[in-house]
Image: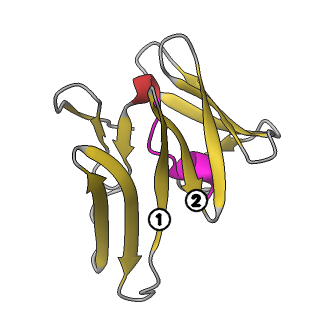
Amino acid sequence: MGAKTGWTHEYYYDGGKLLEVEWKDTANPTPQGFRLVYDAEGVAGIEFGGSVYAFVKDGLGNVATLVNNSGNISARYLYDAWGRCKVIDSSGNELTLANNATHPAILNPIRWKSQYLDQETRLVLDERPLVLSKINN
């Protein structure tokens, strides 16, 4: 994706816990963003556009499904053996950043093993003491 000229990102933390991410550009100064929802075990969902989406995780801690406020499946995440992810909507269509950049399942940065994927830098952060990895796809 690469850096975008004129874009700013703001990250809001409570201690070491990321709470909210906001972004805006000079052409549209109205901020957009999301909030992370936590439970006793860690990140449990994402709030975007006034709606809360809950994570359903598999036994490895991967976010497998995104469920909306009504309990309906918004999207599924399918991972290969290396953790590369395909995002599939409720109709079975693949979602990508290029074809559906505003879908909550694409904006959701929590994916494989509950790691944080930064769309701008394509870096992955996890909850262990700061670990960064580069995603090339």
Residue tagged 2:
48
The 10 Å Cα crowd at callout 2, few under 14, some 14 to 19, many 20 or more, is: some
Residue tagged 1:
33
Q: Position of residue 109 (x, y in %)?
A: 44, 44
Does residue 110 appear left or right of residue 71 in this picture?
left
Marks 2 and 1: CB-CB under 8 Å? yes
Image quarter hosting the C terminus: top left
Residue 4 visible: no
The kind of secondary structure the magenta stretch mainly shows is loop
Instruction: Give 1 or 89, whichever is nearer the viewer.
Output: 89
Q: Is residue 97 magenta?
A: no
Q: Residue at x 33, y 56 (%)?
A: 120
Q: Under tag 2, what secondary structure?
A: strand
Q: What range of the chain is rendered magenta?
A: 102-111
Q: Residue at x 79, y 39 (%)?
A: 71
Its colouring scheme is: secondary structure
Q: Is residue 107 magenta?
A: yes
Asked if residue 25 is positioned above or below residue 56 in the image, the reply reads: below
Q: Position of residue 97 (x, y in %)?
A: 53, 53
Instruction: Give 131 or 94, whichever is nearer the viewer.
Output: 131
Q: Residue at x 54, y 10 (%)?
A: 59
Q: Residue at x 64, y 64 (%)?
A: 50
Q: Under tag 1, what secondary structure?
A: strand
Image label count: 2
